[in-house]
Amino acid sequence: MYTKISNKNRISILVLLLALSLLAMLLSLRIGSAPISVGDLMNMMIGRGNSSAPLLQDILLEVRMPRILLSFLVGLALGASGTVMQSLLQNPLASSYTLGVSSGASLGASTVMLFGINFMSPSISMSLAGFAFGLVTVVIVLLFAQQFSQALENQTIILVGMVFSLFVNSFLTLMMTFSPDYMQRIIFWQLGSFSGASWENVQLLALLFTFSFFCLIYFHREMDILSFGDAFALSQGVEVKRTKVILIGLSTLLTGASVAMTGVIGFVDLIAPHVARRLFGATHKWVLPSSALVGGLLCVLADTVARSVFQSRELPIGAVTALIGAPFFCYIFFRKGQV
């Protein structure tokens, strides 16, 4: 049962989530193989860095800051995308994996790595390939689903998506088998990492997220209605098929770009919408921004843990989020009693 709270309290919680996210990012800036004191951090951020320690300033501005901002943006994107998937498919366990978006984006990014494709820049090439392959995967899933159900029923979409996701993953495995030189690189990338973050990544994902997020907010009323089922949505005058296609396309853009830049980061898009609904109820005008912020906070914390647990090596982000997400998945599964 969802919580009923006033709009004033909802705004307060959103501000609190934003403040926690900013605090987590500031703390994360200090943590690493080269610790930075609070005083040095503040001085460098306002342009008064110690000229005798240019290395620390380079680490902060060129390594940690883009990495932390990218982790936050990826969390925002996955949180919003997960909300869309769970609402449209009326399934509390739905995520970017459900329609094969992550698998398709992984295949696209791996293809770019394997063949050395470079359009404008590596990050743009990876993002375009991730989105394009993710979109193609979703289009194929929807076309197949339409063969079985003209109305694009949710159960049909989920089943076709899961089957096609397995097919794409098997194709990706074959690619790695025939390209042993790239196997280790692709496997490590698939586990998720923000180590390759750059300001170009940050700017590109910020642009994509801003566009997609405001489009999703525009459709918040339709998402509220669709969460009650296709039949009810039709009775309320919603163009169900058209709306689903648009929303799934926006969700694919968010997930595809994120996966292409950082690899597959699981469970964030599963956990964030549930936390948001617990806090805000079922109204998507509030659930979308809160789910995005929860996702951003989770990714920043996961990245901080991943690069600070061991001094000599970095844990894959996917492993850290899985340690949190797997128990949460089991909790949702057994509480609902159904998939």
Image (cartoon, rainbow, N blue to C red):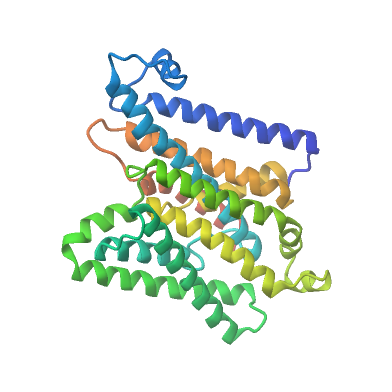
x and y percent of residue 224 in the render? 74, 58
Q: Quadrant of residue 170?
A: bottom left
Q: Which residue occupies 47% across, 30% down? A: 25
How far from the left and from the top, in percent, is residue 260? 40, 56
Q: Residue furthest left?
A: 181
In this rendering, is residue 308 above or below 180? above
Q: Is residue 44 visible?
A: yes
Residue 47 located left or right of residue 221 = left
Residue 184 image offset from top left, x and y in percent: 21, 56
Q: Nearer the viewer, residue 288 or 279?
A: 288
Q: Is residue 33 left or right of residue 285?
A: left
Residue at (53% x, 82% y) in the render: 144
| Residue 73 locus on image (x, y percent) | 50, 44
56 relative to 242 in the view: left or right: left
Quadrant where the image shows the C terminus: bottom right
The number of numbered discs placed on residues in the rendered structure image is 0
Q: Residue furthest bottom?
A: 147
Relative height, residue 239 to residue 182 (above, below): below
Q: Residue furthest right?
A: 236
Q: Residue at x 83, y 73 (%)?
A: 235
The answer to whether residue 327 is seen in the rendering is: no
Q: Is residue 241 above or below residue 55?
A: below
In the image, taking residue 130 as reference, residue 111 lies left or right, namely left
